[in-house]
Amino acid sequence: MPNLTSNEILEFRRKKLTHQERKAIKLAEKSNNPWDHKSLPRPPRDLVESAKVKIRDFHLDRTQKSCCYCGRSLRDAEIETDREHIIPKKDKKGLSYNLFNLSVSCKRCNMSYKKERTDHIVDFDTIEHDMFNPARYKIPHPNIDTYEDHIFRFSLQFGRREITTYKRKSEKGRFLYSFVNLRELCVLQLDLAQTGRSVHDGFRRMFGVSDRGL
Ligand SMILES: [Zn+2]
């Protein structure tokens, strides 16, 4: 995934959002809880809602419809998509609609693990002044880092059998692995009695990973 450039951000705001949507977001940003458009009067509630759909679709395109943390496909009907704030919006309300600070994740990663945590950010208090610096994030940032440079998700389904594992390739990959508990998503559903050790061993040789990841 290439870096999200400031030109792309400007282009999104100018070309994808309507003038009314941009105005509605500005109004929302002045409220106590900017991201909670449901508490806004109508208008601008509908306009904020349509802008949020556009933001989600923009990031679904960027991630090729996958969760920015676990890498699972968001095309799967059972996996619900959340708009994800990399820097939590709770304490940094001004970043609620900042396209760079947003991505898409699955509900599991967002609600069960990431929540409002801030320990994935180096010096949280000053992050908004240096938010484009990849060194300020202990996880791969979906808009400045390439996911596969840090952690590689391998998943294979054949018949009813499945192998899913993660190869941790950097400090950021290792941090992310425990941050959203990717261990829980590793699967080895191979009936070794039927398929033989060779499938398991071949898999390990090919990808240098085990069913428990590395
Ligand atoms: Zn996820």
Image (cartoon, grey):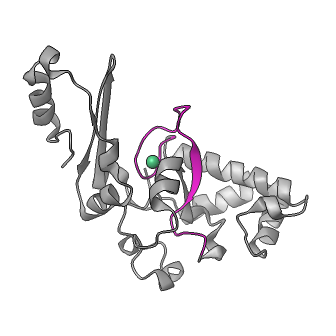
Q: Measuring 73% from the left and 71% from the top, which residue is drawn there?
A: 33
x then y, percent, for residue 150: 29, 55
Residue range highlighted in magenta: 65-90
x then y, percent, for residue 136: 39, 75
The residue most toward the right is 42
x then y, percent, for residue 174: 26, 59
Q: Measuring 52% from the left and 82% from the top, which residue is drawn there?
A: 129
Is residue 48 toward the left or the right of residue 66 in the image? right
Residue 106 visible in image: no
Is 21 covered by the magenta stretch?
no
- Placement of 60 over or under 18, stated as above or below: above
Q: Specify the principal SS of the magenta part.
A: loop
x then y, percent, for residue 194: 15, 14
- Placement of 126 over or under 113, stated as above or below: below
Is residue 45 toward the left or the right of residue 16 in the image? right
Seen from the viewer's position, the closer of residues 106 and 128 is 106
Seen from the viewer's position, the closer of residues 135 and 11 is 135
Q: Measuring 46% from the left and 73% from the top, which residue is drawn there?
A: 118
Is 69 covered by the magenta stretch?
yes
Place residue 178 in its image quadrant. bottom left
Seen from the viewer's position, the closer of residues 22 and 6 is 22
